[in-house]
Image (tube, helix red, strand yellow):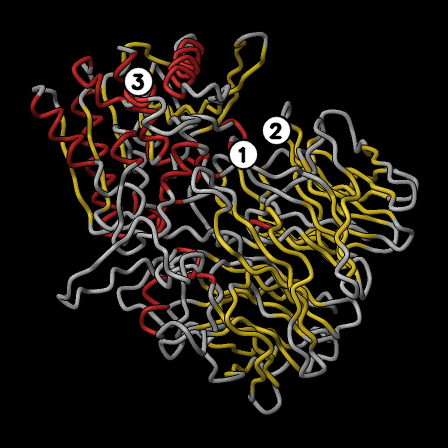
Amino acid sequence: MEQTLTVSEILNIKEPAYSVHMSISSNNVWLAFCLGGNSAENKSKGVSMVVEGNSQWVCNLKTGQAFPIASEAKSSWAGVWSPDGRTLAFFADIDDKACLWLWDSNESTLKKASNLIVCPFFGFEKPIWSKDGQYIIVKSLPSEGLSHDFYTAMNQNIIIPSDNKPKVFNSQSNDAKSNEIADNSWVNRYRADISKINIATGTSTLLCSGLRPVGMELSKDGRSLAFTSCSGEERIDSQQNNYDLWISSLSSDATPRCVAGNIRMNYGLTFGWADNHSIYYTTSGSLADGGLWHVDTYTHKVELLYKNEKIHLGHDYEPPKPFKDGKVALVANGKLWCFSHDSGELEEITVKNERTIVAGFPVTSDKHILLQTHNPNGSYDGFYKVNMITGKATLIIEEQAGHLPWYEGGSAANEGTIAYIFQDADKPPTLKVFNFESFNEKTIELNPISSTQLGTSQMIRWKSDDRELKGALLLPRNIKKPVPAVIRVYGGSMQSQSIRLFGLSQSKCDNHQLFASRGYAVFLPDLPMSWTNEPADDITSSIEKAVEALVKHPDIDPKRIAIIGHSFGGYSALVAITRLQLFKAAIVSAGIANIISCYTHFDSCDPDTNSNYGLIEGGLFDMGATMWDERARYIRNSPIFDFHKIETPVLIIQGTRDHVCHAEAGPMFSSLKRLDKTAQLVLYDEEHYQGSWRHENIEDYYQRVFEWLEKYV
């Protein structure tokens, strides 16, 4: 008899840490990669909630041996090889504070490079080696302005205990400092110094302080560092982040210079050196023009090179990639573009019919660019090499599997080798190394799991307003009669793209094989929104059509459908059960039922930057106006006002330290209780994202979910 897949088995799966980049040594002998993990009870200084629990690994590409190099650390990440390929620089909190560490591949020895406390917030913020390999540039704990304890708490979303003194908040200020960013603003989680560490002596030199650096890149001659500094949201009704572009010299005591200001970017990453004195960048975000810009770092002249309302070149992670002949490669909107600086013209380079360009590797030659591709019709992922001079695309490898892009920590490449994570709906992440000159491939197993326990996937297709939509369906093995199904919803998302990911998920905290091994099918449909300021109508229509397509499948029991959603997916599920009587059970985690209360939510830990204004007016909820301008719109799009129509039993899950919507679950449950509806509220001492939860709480959560489904479905 087959054993049911346990939550513990899934939680012990080794999967790539989100947005922590892989690195291949220059001699093609070693690969550095990072695996995700679990957060610790005792927080370390300099370790943000984004990277907590990560584990730095290395793999010998010749022997296939893979192992962690800092087992004493609670968190280790961001490994980058030295120019000579011998030494790995990475961050680790071995002594309860994040520092720069060095691992020598020849001697297999580990040493601390400096006692300086580092403080990168995102996983992609990695150490930067100098060209000669003698120095390493890092983000370090601010030397002024914010206390160590307050800074660490901000980066961990820890609430600072009250000192029992009155707190005073002003909506407006005539103070001379009214335009400055408050110390407790969310944007100060990026606050850091930039320091240069001498790896021979362990001493550090301060390059810059008092800013909020995120993206950093060394110039081609290694003499200057370009970096972006975040200034926060441009408008209170949007989620558009702005950045300033700065230059700091590494070889002198020159003062850092701001060469361009108020650049619209989501993460401050989409810039790259054209040569040693000029930089290309693209803009991204809800207010961005999506244009290609150029900055002369000597004269500070900023020039818009290309802008087209029909072609948006913005991307969250992909910077422009310049070539020596004046051409610039850009990956945006699933396409590869080539811009000629001389002619000012932009052309699309077609790789192959039906291939979507997922990513372009940072490693480029004088003529070629290496691309990650996806064929949505056949669900094939692959790698292509494109000659930017001739436009010729050469296939390297393509397979019916799921590949994560390099910027999500799923792959790396140099001139002759690609290392990547291979997975499928029923195949847990596996490391593969492919030499595209010899065409030799090596597989390094990370997760031995019996495949007989796992469900298999297929694609469902349907038409909606002359548009073909798809949904990824995970079915239990050995189906003998129609099975119950769980539909996961998230308005605006194209979830079918996850069909080749293990358990149809990039995160093990919501791996759907747990449902399949218990006899449930799981359906992840595309749920597009038209952005007409009526999100509830869009979501209702999309979910209804997706369910219609699902119940036509011969293996699905149309009378036993449950719905599940997290965050905006929780809102989507609540909209569905108030407007559609199709579901036998609902699971809503971190959901929002009342747009009005979410819109006016006040957080005393972050009073000067209420991100919910942008989330509601111009973000996912798409209200398009203030509550006082469109009161009726806010009411009709808030499911709580239609709770009397609910006939579905609702399991409500909420983290009490959820900075997004911790106050929403209580009123949601109270309303259902007053209406005598079937509901249960479960509170956990956890954050918003379940991937950061303690394992015992995730296990408890799933136990309750399965009991709920067993009882009502």
Q: Is residue 519 above or below residue 435?
A: above
Circle on res. 500 = 1
| Residues at marks 1 and 3, CA–CA distance in whole angstroms | 42 Å
Is residue 11 left or right of 17 when viewed as pictured?
Answer: left
Q: Check disc 1 and give the amino acid type.
A: Arg
Quarter of the image where the N terminus is located: top left
Seen at 68% across and 38% down, the residue is 332
Residue at x 49% of width, y 34% of height: 425
Above or below for 665 versus 143: above
Q: Check whether the beta carbons of the residues at disc 3 and disc 2 lie within 8 A of each other.
A: no
- Say which quarter of the image contains residue 160: bottom left
Q: Which mark is residue 380?
A: none
**Residue situated in front as seen by the camera: 108 or 217:** 217
Q: Which of disc 2 and disc 3 is earlier in sequence?
A: 2
Q: Amino acid at mark 3?
A: Ala
Query: Are the two marked residues, 1 and 3, in contact with CB atoms closer than 8 angstroms?
Result: no
Seen as rendered, the residue at the extreme front is 174
Please tell me which residue lies in front, 298 or 565.
298
* Quadrant of image for the C terminus: top left
Give left or right: position of 701 versus 74.
left
On screen, residue 399 versus residue 305, left or right, reads left
In front of the other: label 1 or label 3? 3
- Residue for badge 3: 632
Instruction: Give the class, few, some or many, for how many residues have Cα within 10 Å of label 2's Cα (few <14, many ≥20).
Output: some
Q: Secondary structure at mark 1?
A: loop
Where's residue 300, x and y in %? 75, 60
Look at mark 2 in the image and give the residue it sits on: 379
Q: Mark 3 and mark 2: span between their CA atoms?
A: 43 Å
Q: Position of residue 51 (x, y in %)?
A: 44, 60
Residues at discs 1 and 2 in contact (Cβ within 8 Å): yes
Q: Would you identify the image quadrant in which residue 400 lies? A: top right
As shown in the figure, which amino acid type bears the numbered disc 2? Ser
